[in-house]
Image: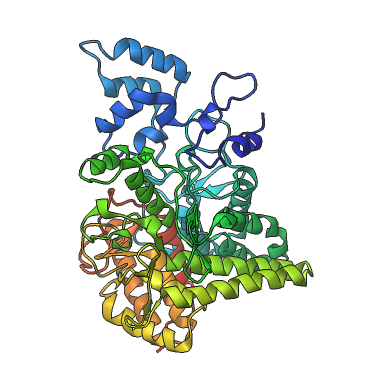
Amino acid sequence: MPLALILLTTACRQSAPQGDTATAANSAEPLLYDPAQRLGQLFVEVQMGKIFPDGKTFPDCSPKGSVDSIMTEYVRLRKAPNFDLKQFVLDNFEMPHKYSSGFKSDTSQAPEKHIQALWDVLTRKPDSRQRGTLIPLPNPYVVPGGRFGEVYYWDSYFTMLGLQKDGRADLINNMIDNFAYLIDTIGFIPNGNRTYFLSRSQPPFFAGMVSILAEEKGDDIYVKYLPQLEKEYQFWMKDQSKLSMENAAELHVVRMPDGSILNRYYDNSAAPRAEMYAADVELSKTSKRPPGELYRDLRSACESGWDFSSRWLSEPTKLYSIRTTSIIPVDLNALLYNLELTIAKGYRGKKDQSKAQEYEALAAARNKAIQKYCWDAKAGFFVDHDWVKGTPTGVLSLAGMFPLFYKLASTAQAASAAVVLEKNFLRPGGLVCTSNRNGQQWDAPNGWAPLQWISIQGLRNYDQHKLADDIKSRWIKLNVKTYKATGKMVEKYNVEDISLTAGGGEYPVQDGFGWTNGVLRGLLGEKPLKN
């Protein structure tokens, strides 16, 4: 049975993914291997026993032989007095490959040269059928690096910014074709090409990727990828017809009190994350909430890419207070506004004016709803909206810069946002995600490359060049300083204490690193800073 058909029939169900049950013709092993499901108690014991320091390691391992045989042997041996669980895993599973781990930097080189050299190091060749959790893709793609040996959805947009500067339109095209393949085969772009990510997507940047390629190859690109753009939109808007005054939310869609429709992040599973299984189970023990509810909100924050942040917490220092599914995120809705306009552009390219106007009307309605529910006049900034409570969340975050990036803001709103940005977010090394210090990696003191780019370009859209260039200068200096000191580009940075080489968070700092490389290369490739 072709992989596309397997994916289509197993991975797109509106429940926890069951792809593991599908088998290939003439094979006793499943094409889509779900380790939590297939390994059962072995998976639980490995993860809860913290056999590996990183909870992602075991889900990324590949069985060396038949899973049934491994499980039979495990059941036979596990009660033996001298049973060594870790050695059993090492004997029966192949460890995941770490991209860029053997790369040696030459810090005498300019950062641009270092980044150019890393593209090939971080590029994964087309995948073949294998036993592990990796979902095979037909074309080459860039992985972030470190613990992340698969492609990630929203990371890839920012990676493409650097690839574009280095003339790698071929690789951009390959990656977009991979995402189009995922949309065609499973109905959406998952968080990453792992089977344990099949219950969620990530911030919908596919339209932005298509726009990057259109800059290189012309506007016919919008027509070429129109079917996939529209299919992704249908994924985010699924079950809209089920909404009513009595039933305000279904999957990703929420009916607001005035009847308008906005979106939220929503993972389709209510189980602990395979890659952070022990952490999720342990957190549930400290919470009085139903475990499934907690797990879904944790997973939904992963769909946002902001895992984790005070944006999602009712108590800023308590992760168990996470309530992602109760929140209308301003960044997600700005992204979907752009998706609606991009689909309209594709229909205009097809000379279908009626369909183009339909999507432009949807974008205009979303813009109106964002203005009503996500502009906080008192704060002078765009903020997330708690649709359950019917109030703004009150958390100022860099998600509030997405309306400027997509030109949703008025001139007055943009001017106000610039003042708030400089006062509340600007630090010696760039911008913090929020001003809250609570140990979460998408809060202070951390700065992340994608949010620097969104903020800088959002400010420029409204002629706020002085502040944009100041942020750019601080971010570049911190990135280059860290590179010269360590030979690395890292995933996130401490922008408050620039004497440190990286920021902290849920897992150890990763180097490589796809979107940091992309954003820095994009910024370094611009014209000189304004005076």
Residue at 37 percent across and 72 percent down: it is: 383
Residue at 65 percent across and 22 percent down: it is: 25
Residue 46 in which image quadrant: top left
Q: How many marks?
A: 0
Q: Position of residue 165 (x, y in %)?
A: 53, 67
Residue 359 in which image quadrant: bottom right
From the viewer's perspective, is 45 left or right of 24?
A: left
Q: Which residue is most to the right?
A: 351
Q: How is the image coloured?
A: rainbow
| Residue in front for this viewpoint, 295 or 521 | 295
Q: Which residue is most to the front?
A: 246
Q: Is residue 245 above or below residue 38?
A: below
Residue at 48 percent across and 81 percent down: it is: 409
Q: Position of residue 195 (x, y in %)?
A: 49, 38
Q: Is residue 189 above or below residue 259?
A: above
Q: Quadrant of the N terminus?
A: top right
From the viewer's perspective, is 66 left or right of 499?
A: right
| Residue in front for this viewpoint, 106 or 311 | 311
Q: Position of residue 322 (x, y in %)?
A: 30, 54
| Residue in front for this viewpoint, 166 or 390 | 390
Residue 441 at least partly seen: yes
Residue 524 at least partly seen: no
Q: Is residue 286 above or below residue 214?
A: above
Residue 452 in which image quadrant: bottom left
Residue at 46 percent across and 77 percent down: it is: 372
Q: Quadrant of the C terminus?
A: bottom left
Q: Is residue 7 above or below residue 108?
A: above
Q: Position of residue 52 (x, y in %)?
A: 28, 34
